[in-house]
Amino acid sequence: MGRRQLSVRRARRQRQGATIGYIVTWDADSGDAALCSRLRRFVFGYSLASDGRRYRYPGLVEKEGVRYLGQSVLFVTHARLSELRRFLEQLGVPHVVTHASLGAIMPG
């Protein structure tokens, strides 16, 4: 399945009504593989296999009050903003926060 279809499927799972919050965008150094990996794991989560069992650790996009908008762009409610900003600041990743509101996702 293409990357594009995964993004649409993720957005459909995140259906919710109109929400007031913030658009957060960041610019990570793509040449820093360790940094990009930490960001990916934090945002999208990860799973591990051990002794034949799989353990799933959800990322920020799976939490209430977070909507994935695109590469390096999330919409977060006030309740999630400090969590995301703290993480980005700890990694030294430059980011911009913009006050915004989103309407309900329309089926399509």
Image (spheres, rainbow, N blue to C red):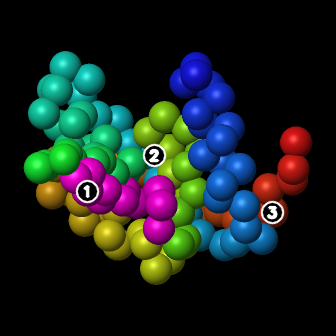
User: Sequence order check: which comes first, mark 1 or mark 2?
Assistant: 2
Would you place residue 8 above or below residue 18 in this image? above
Q: Measuring 43% from the left and 72% from the top, which residue is drawn there? A: 80
Q: Quadrant of the N terminus?
A: top right
* Label 3 neighbour load within 10 Å: few <14, some 14-19, many 20+: few
Q: Residue 58: image x %, image y %?
A: 36, 59
Label drawn at residue 25: 2
Mark 1, Cα crowd under 10 Å, few <14 / some 14-19 / many 20+, is few
**Who comes first in sequence, dot 1 or dot 3?**
1
The mark lying in front, picked from 1 and 3, is: 1
> Is 20 above or below relative to 91?
below
Q: What element carries label 1?
A: strand
Q: Nearer the viewer, mark 3 or mark 2?
A: 3
Identity of the amino acid at label 2? Thr
- Looking at the rendered structure, the kind of residue marked 3 is Ala
Magenta range: 53-63
Q: For residue 85, which quarter of the picture?
A: bottom left
Residue 57 point in image, percent of width and height: 29, 59
Camera-side residue of 67 and 97: 67
Q: In this view, does 2 lie to the left or right of 106?
A: left
Q: Which of marks 1 and 2 is in front?
A: 1
Distance from disc 3 to disc 2, alpha carbons, whole Å, reads 21 Å
Q: Residue at x 58, y 20 (%)?
A: 2
Look at mark 1 in the image and give the residue it sits on: 55
Quadrant of the image occupied by residue 94: top left
Residue 90 in view here: yes
N-term mark: 3 or 2: 2
Mark 3 — residue? Answer: 104
In the image, is 82 to the left or to the right of 18?
left
